[in-house]
Image: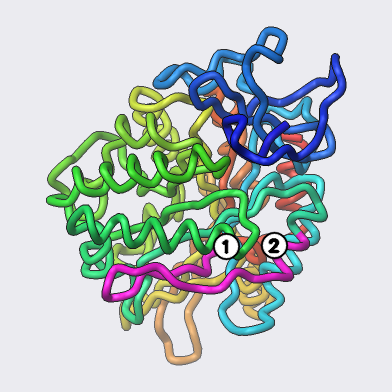
Amino acid sequence: MRKGPGTSYATLTKVNPATKLVVLARHDDWYQVRLDGGKVGWIAGFLLVDPLDAREGDAGLGANDAASATPGRSTNSTTWVLGYYTEDYPGDPTSYGSLLRGKGVLDSMAAFLHPVGTDGRVSGTASKRAVEAAKAAGIQALALVHNMGPSGFDAKRASALLQNTNSREAAIRDILSILEQGGYDGVNIDLENVRPSERDKLTAFMQELAQKLKPRGYLVTMSVPAKTADHSGADWVGAFDYYALGRVCDRVMLMTYDEHSWTSGPGPVASYNWVEKVVRYAITQMPRSKILLGIPAYGYDWNLQTGKVTALSYTQVMSRAKALGIDPSWDQTARSPYFKYVDSHGARHEVWFESSSSIKPKLDLVTAYNLGGVAIWRLGYEDDAYWQVIRQKLG
């Protein structure tokens, strides 16, 4: 088993005959595989007995897509569980503690630590403790590249990266260096608020990135905004060509949340019917086995008097409800919990959030539509019951 797809790459280990392998990806006549202990490398196709079909553009790796099985759990698993990892300040324990608790359930973590600058270059330092903890648990570590700025996801930062071949090549060199120095297994691209006019440039960037990283054995994944039709000219979603991106990426994370958020009135964060509509569109555009359904672990509190919207973790939501002496209600249509209250200033509030109960029907969608798995935003927002439901539904 070699580090990359070819005899020019260093040998990682020798594999005994009849060893069972999990196929992750294919490049020419070489297959990226994972051993039962979690070690990942490349093996020539002629050495494998009945390798799974991984033809470019096909439906992932077939109906029994072994790429969906993961190093964090038994290779009998049929889904991938990814958690987004954040550190809001040095030593922030929120996601780290959740990463440790997710051992045995998580298969991959994407570290939201690598911003795109105003010059289009990618920076950031890997969290050594997070990568080491992930590796020790057999969890793949991805470097998440994002264009978040002081005022949110910045269209100008994305444009600076995407603008031409030279800018894209520079960013790709930065990403490769980050992966090599940080000990990552791959990358997750999370560019948001990209201008619709840059649709082709975004696709070109992902194609160029894959051409550079995949032969070196790295996974190339992408987080994309949820949509129920192409809407190629629409703000926020128009730049994302589901069909093209689904062909080039190893995994595509559907951000099926924020149906209602900062820019809308109150309502469910991810109602069941809306999520299913997104899924039903996505599976017409990309291989089902590559799709990870985004599942949130948070909520929003809308102040109906001032218009202010506050994001809350599940724990914060429940603490607020307890302090108010409120037992949250359940909306059967949205399949989401919520509650209303009046604050000490007389302002009416409406709170919608996600819980272990609301993610159950979403996890059923993963099974019903034979999707590749789920992506949790974000680690540290959930409670123990959240993990229990994932174990029960996808374990």
Q: Mark 2 points at which residue?
A: 131
The image position of residue 207, as x and y in percent, is 33, 40
Is residue 351 part of the magenta span, yes or no? no
Residue 116 vs residue 33, the one in the foreground: 33
- Measured in 3D between alpha carbons, the distance from the residue under mark 2 to the one under mark 1, in whole angstroms, is 9 Å
Left or right: where 4 falls relative to 262: right
Q: Residue at x 44, y 72 (%)?
A: 123
Of mark 2 and mark 1, the one earlier in the sequence is: 1
Give the magenta range.
Answer: 111-133
**Residue 23 visible in image:** yes
Q: Residue 111 carries which label?
A: 1
Which amino acid type is shown beneath numbered disc 2? Val
Q: Which residue is drawn at 68% across and 35% down?
A: 2
Which amino acid type is shown beneath numbered disc 1? Ala
Question: Looking at the image, is 40 positioned above or below residue 338?
Answer: above
Residue 42 vs residue 24, the one in the foreground: 42
The image position of residue 24, as x and y in percent, is 62, 30
